[in-house]
Structure formats: structure tokens, C-alpha cells
Amino acid sequence: MYVKFADCAKIVKSAFPDYSGRGDVSVDCSGRFDCVDRYWSSGCKNEYVIVGLVDGLPCAEIPGVNPLRGTADQYDCAVPAGYAVVCRKFRGQREVIEISVPPEGVVQFLPAPQPALSANQVKVLYYTRSLKSSYGGQSNYRQASSGLSAETWNSVKAELIAMGLLDKRGALTTNGKNVARGLDNQRDESRLLA
């Protein structure tokens, strides 16, 4: 799930005080994480810090490993109860934050419940998440692929903007990403084809 940076800034800034990004943060509530790529390789590197969920204080940094002395990548590690593992991913010029928490720790990150969506709203969110806006010289590719008329697409898009699931440009907001991701996870083709 995605959360707004402002909703988890205390934990992120506690782990990485020099982090200056403001984009969405990915939160994994499986209670597991892969501790990999802790050294620079092809312009990429991950850094990990364990932070207390209650006090927001960092308690341990997972050190990097020199690849010439052997990698110590660890897969399927458990997140300790009451803590979060904050991963800062360097990808060239871009930085991404991912937070892994145990299932009982995810409550503080949960977004507000969303209202039920109509079949057309589901279609617009699904095609907005899944397809580029134009492709192969065809503008409005999403709308054309959905089977909705331009008028219906635009009115539903306006509804989703009012609901806060799309921004004024028609791009997914943080809440929109979460709802659209849920649609992808359900793979409810019957609602899309209705």
C-alpha cells in the first residue's frame, strides 16, 4: 500500500534525517523483508534502519557489505514486533522509501476507507493505472481501450477527481494508487466487463 510522505515523515526522518524526498512511501505489512543490495552496484544501493513504531526512534542500522568479501544478502527476514524496517533505495538520481512492518503495526498507516465505486469508476481507475494515456499515435488510449465514450470517461474522471482518487491532471493520487492496486490484486474482470 502507499502512504503520503507526511503520514510517515516522523519514521522516515528518524531513520534517514538527510532524506529530502516527498513522494509516496510504500508500506509492506507482511512482516517480512529482503535485506539485499546493501552495497553500490550499477548505481543502485539499499540502506536499512530499524525504527520503533511507538517512539519513532532508530534502534539499529543494518550495515552494508563489501561484495569483494562476500555478499551477505538475507532473504525473507522477519520484522521484529513493535518495529519497522525502513529501506532507502538509491536508484541513480532517484530515491525511494519502503517501510516493512509486522501486520499488527500497519494500523497507523492505514488510509481512510473509500466509498464503494461504480462499475465505470472501477474501469477508469483500472485503465488509468494499467495503460499509458496515448499509444501508437492514438490519443486517449485509456478511454478507447475501456470501451467508454469520451463523454462518460470525462464525467467519471471528474467524479474520481472530486473523490480524491485522481488529481486534476487525471493521474492517480496516493489514495487512488491504493484503490487501483486493490483492483489489480482482486483481478475482478467481471466488474471491468460489466
Image (cartoon, rainbow, N blue to C red):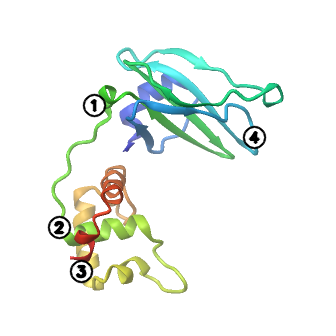
Q: Is residue 40 visible?
A: yes
Image label count: 4
Front residue of this view, candidates 39 and 188:
188
Q: Amino acid at mark 2?
A: Ser
What residue would you read off at disc 2?
A: 118
Comparing marks 4 and 3, which lies closer to the viewer?
4
- Residue 191 placed where, x, y %? 23, 69
Q: Earlier in the sequence, mark 4 or mark 2?
A: 4
Residue at point 63%, 34% (across, down):
36
Q: Are marks 1 and 2 in contact (CB under 8 Å)?
A: no
Q: Are marks 4 and 3 in contact (CB under 8 Å)?
A: no
What residue would you read off at disc 4?
A: 41
Q: Where 27 falls versus 173 (above or below)?
A: above
Q: Amino acid at mark 3?
A: Thr
Q: Amino acid at mark 4?
A: Ser
**Left or right: residue 117 compared with residue 14:** left
Q: Is residue 17 visible?
A: no
Q: Give the structural element (helix, strand or loop) at label 4.
A: loop
Q: Earlier in the sequence, mark 3 or mark 2?
A: 2
What residue would you read off at disc 1?
A: 107
- Residue 26 placed where, x, y %? 44, 41
Q: Quadrant of residue 172?
A: bottom left
Distance from disc 4 to disc 2, alpha carbons, whole Å, reads: 46 Å
Distance from disc 3 to disc 1, alpha carbons, whole Å, reads: 37 Å
Q: Give the structural element (helix, strand or loop) at label 2.
A: loop
Q: Give the structural element (helix, strand or loop) at label 1.
A: helix
**Left or right: residue 158 compared with residue 96:** left
Front residue of this view, candidates 122 and 76:
76
Looking at the rendered image, the quarter that the C terminus falls into is bottom left
- Residue 87 placed where, x, y %? 54, 32
Residue at point 37%, 27% (across, down):
102
- Residue 65 placed where, x, y %? 73, 25
